[in-house]
């Protein structure tokens, strides 16, 4: 009788762990969508303000939207970590991956502002690190649309090096659509069907 109880208890623990992992994947779909839509909106807004309005501060959507996204992400991340009973392998891996992404992003932006990186190279380089983030996340999750999204970022980054800044904004928006937004919706849909 004791062994039967242990088997049932083990199955319950395994079921709970699977449920927690599925729930985490759904949450991560949320962050891909949040940042995907924010970056997409910033890139398109920057393009419109630059090309059609010709506003001196056409870059303004970036700091505004990214700051709002950072605040919202911090709040959502805090709630997520408070609700979690334990951290999964994906949680730990994602924390290190996206922390490295932020460090690389800030370095690219800082060295561009200091004149050490050509401004025409900044967005293609940022697209490269977007690709690393989605490629690695897709590999950890075994989710092919994120892996493909990472590869698309790299291809579009390579193309962007040959185009002027205004076109780079459109290529950035396209890369985010294909690497964050579409895979984010697919991830959310997949996890909602399995939870």
Image (cartoon, helix red, strand yellow):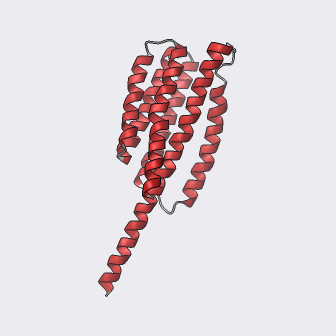
Q: Nearer the viewer, residue 86 or 149?
A: 149
Res. 92 visible in picture? no
Is residue 21 found left or right of 83 in the rendered image?
left
Q: How many marks?
A: 0
Residue shown at the point (37%, 30%) measured from the top left: 151
Q: Position of residue 168 (x, y in %)?
A: 50, 18
The C terminus appears in which quarter of the rendering? bottom left
| x, y percent for residue 26 | 48, 51
Q: At 38% from the left edge and 24% from the top edge, which residue is drawn? A: 155
Task: Specify whether 138 is left or right of 66.
Answer: left
In the image, residue 14 sits, relative to residue 44, either above or below, namely below
Q: Is residue 7 above or below residue 49?
A: below
Looking at this view, is 71 or 175 the one in front? 175
- The quadrant where residue 73 appears: top right
Asked if residue 48 can be seen in this view, the reply is yes
Above or below, 112 relative to 194: above
Residue furthest bottom as drawn: 1
Where residue 70 sits in the image (x, y, percent)? Answer: 61, 40
Rendered location of residue 48, percent (x, y):
62, 19
Work out which quarter of the rendered image holds the N terminus and state it.
Answer: bottom left
């Amino acid at each position: 009788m004791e062994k039967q109880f242990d088997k049932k208890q083990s199955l319950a623990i395994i079921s709970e762990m699977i449920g927690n992992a599925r729930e985490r994947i759904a949450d991560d779909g949320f962050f891909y969508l949040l940042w995907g839509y924010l970056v997409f909106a910033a890139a398109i807004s920057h393009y419109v303000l630059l090309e059609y309005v010709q506003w001196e501060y056409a870059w303004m959507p970036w700091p505004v939207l990214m700051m709002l996204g950072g605040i919202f992400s911090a709040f959502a991340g805090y709630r997520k970590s408070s609700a979690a009973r334990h951290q999964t392998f994906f949680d730990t891996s994602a924390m290190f991956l996206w922390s490295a992404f932020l460090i690389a992003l800030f370095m690219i932006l800082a060295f561009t502002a200091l004149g050490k990186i050509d401004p025409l190279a900044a967005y293609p380089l940022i697209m490269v690190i977007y690709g690393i983030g989605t490629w690695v996340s897709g590999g950890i999750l075994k989710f092919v649309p994120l892996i493909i999204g990472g590869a698309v970022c790299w291809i579009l980054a390579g193309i962007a090096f040959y185009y002027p800044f205004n076109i780079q904004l459109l290529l950035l928006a396209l890369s985010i659509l294909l690497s964050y937004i579409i895979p984010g919706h697919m991830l959310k849909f997949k996890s909602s069907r399995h939870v």
